[in-house]
């Protein structure tokens, strides 16, 4: 496949003209120059396979992988949880790996049942009636949730908490430029959404209110306040939840959520440098006809035996896209099966144990870090397994220093969360972190911030 290119010069020129750009360099100008490949791979054309593999191995060795080269205290939506051998073994069986979309139920009962079980588990975790067969990732799930909410409410205003993952909000903003949704940012006050902040509502009643639980800073939001806001305005409540923390928290459905979304990476998927991940999506039965993507249902066959099929699927999603409520026509089957295996293996008590161990580790780590001179809490609100700190030094510089010491220290927080300073650090603790690792981490932090 040397020299393979999927696009002709004429197609590239047509694409650039449509975008109003003069060259491919302009198209990729948003990619920082420091991470662009300059001059190709420095590999001879037609190199033997062993030479190519040796070169790729050399390049891959430059990465510092969590669990191998660094101890991970970073989170922000992707977490270093344990993936049991049973989850890896079962999810990687050829029956699941090779299966694609289950258009023909007569030959796809196995994967359809697995997806049905996944949907049941996600619905139980989220506390609402129905879950779809999965979406691409948490950000995609948020976009679909907002699309459903504004369509159901008949209003395009979206009150969006700053506590929602900033990457997800950026994706939502990109889609909103095409859909016409009006996003209104709701600021945080001491770590939680300030729904009463001046201008928080932008004047008009929203169609959707979006809040995270716990939020990006790890803080527990008051979902009762968000629900009351929706009741006053007639908006739908969209909750971005953490499926691991759900092991010990009341479900979003218990708080009155209409739509619940989340990132499922923590349910059996490794960090893998960013993917593939899993979008969780569930909603109340009232909105099942607007559900994006696929839904697997249980029925009986011609002989009265239990069977599974895709159901309640709007045909417009495939052939009349201009009338569709969603552009999603597929799902992350392999990732969904992985999550089902992981949740089935853990069970209710196992998931609660992981959440508790993570929360206890986070409490210990936070208390030890706050004992370091100059480190202060960024917010006072209760947290679960993630928390934000103020450092006496530039947080991004501290992260770099700790990487050299073998720790992925966390995520440097932007000015939005720190009031314009560069000292905010977001730290996460999972059940994989031992007390010895936490103590070593605190000691290195102490040295790095002096």
Image (cartoon, rainbow, N blue to C red):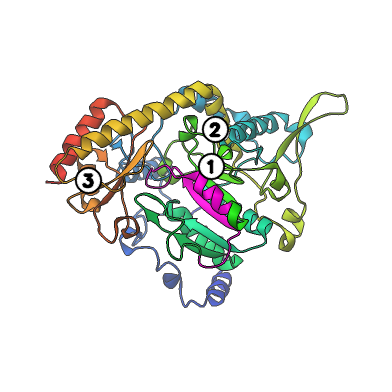
Which portion, as a residue range, is magenta?
202-230
Answer whether labels 1 and 2 touch (C-beta < 8 Å). Answer: yes
Residue under label 2: 339
Element assignment for label 1: loop
Q: Is residue 189 left or right of residue 406?
A: right
User: From what the image shows, is residue 177 above or below residue 281?
Assistant: below
Q: Mark 2 Cα within 10 Å, few/some/many (few <14, many 20+)?
A: many
| Magenta span includes 225 | yes
Element assignment for label 2: helix
Foreground mark, 3 or 2, reads: 3
Residue at image x 68%, y 56%? 152
Foreground mark, 1 or 3, reads: 3
Q: Residue furthest right?
A: 302
Residue 358 drawn at (x, y percent)? 37, 30
Residue 342 drawn at (x, y percent)? 52, 28
Residue 364 quadrant: top left
| Magenta span includes 224 | yes
Q: Nearer the viewer, residue 398 or 28?
A: 398
Q: Is residue 6 left or right of residue 431?
A: right
Whether residue 55 can be seen here: yes
Q: Residue furthest left?
A: 450
Element assignment for label 3: strand
Residue under label 1: 278
Q: Nearer the viewer, residue 117 or 192?
A: 192
Q: Mark 1 Cα within 10 Å, few/some/many (few <14, many 20+)?
A: many
Answer whether labels 1 and 3 touch (C-beta < 8 Å). Answer: no
Residue 189 drawn at (x, y percent)? 37, 54
Residue under label 3: 376
């Amino acid at each position: 496949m040397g020299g393979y290119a999927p696009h002709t010069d004429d197609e590239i020129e047509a694409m650039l003209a449509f975008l109003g750009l003069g060259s491919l360099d302009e198209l990729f100008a948003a990619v920082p120059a420091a991470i662009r490949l300059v001059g190709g791979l420095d590999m001879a054309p037609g190199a033997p396979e062993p030479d190519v593999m040796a070169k790729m191995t050399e390049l891959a060795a430059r990465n510092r992988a969590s669990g191998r080269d660094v101890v991970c205290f970073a989170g922000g939506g992707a977490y270093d949880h344990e993936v049991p051998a049973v989850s890896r073994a079962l999810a990687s069986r050829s029956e699941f790996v090779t299966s694609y979309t289950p258009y023909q139920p007569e030959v796809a009962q196995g994967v359809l049942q697995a997806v049905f079980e996944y949907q049941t588990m996600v619905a139980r975790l989220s506390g609402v009636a129905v879950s779809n067969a999965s979406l691409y990732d948490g950000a995609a799930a948020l976009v679909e949730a907002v699309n459903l909410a504004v369509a159901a409410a008949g209003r395009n205003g979206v009150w969006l908490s700053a506590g929602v993952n900033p990457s997800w909000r950026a994706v939502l903003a990109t889609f909103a430029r095409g859909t016409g949704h009006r996003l209104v940012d709701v600021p945080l006050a001491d770590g939680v959404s300030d729904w009463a902040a001046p201008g928080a509502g932008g004047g008009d009643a929203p169609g959707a209110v979006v809040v995270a639980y716990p939020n990006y800073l790890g803080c527990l939001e008051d979902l009762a306040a968000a629900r009351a806001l929706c009741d006053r305005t007639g908006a739908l409540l969209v909750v971005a939840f953490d499926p691991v923390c759900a092991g010990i928290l009341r479900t979003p459905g218990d708080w009155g959520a209409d739509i619940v979304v989340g990132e499922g990476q923590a349910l059996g998927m490794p960090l893998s440098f960013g993917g593939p991940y899993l979008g969780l999506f569930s909603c109340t039965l009232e909105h099942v006809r607007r559900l994006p993507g696929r839904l697997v249902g249980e029925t009986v066959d011609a002989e009265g035996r239990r069977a599974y099929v895709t159901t309640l699927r709007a045909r417009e999603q495939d052939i009349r896209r201009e009338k569709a409520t969603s552009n999603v026509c597929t799902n992350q089957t392999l990732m969904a099966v992985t999550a089902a295996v992981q949740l089935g293996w853990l069970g209710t008590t196992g998931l609660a144990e992981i959440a508790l161990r993570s929360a206890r580790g986070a409490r210990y780590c936070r208390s030890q870090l706050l004992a370091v001179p100059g480190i202060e809490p960024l917010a006072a609100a209760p947290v679960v397994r993630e928390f934000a700190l103020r450092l006496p030094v530039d947080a991004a510089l501290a992260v770099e220093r700790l990487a050299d010491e073998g720790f992925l220290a966390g995520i440097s927080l932007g000015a939005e969360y720190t009031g314009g300073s560069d000292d905010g650090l977001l730290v996460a603790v999972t059940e994989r972190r031992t007390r010895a690792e936490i103590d070593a981490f605190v000691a290195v932090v102490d040295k790095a911030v002096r």
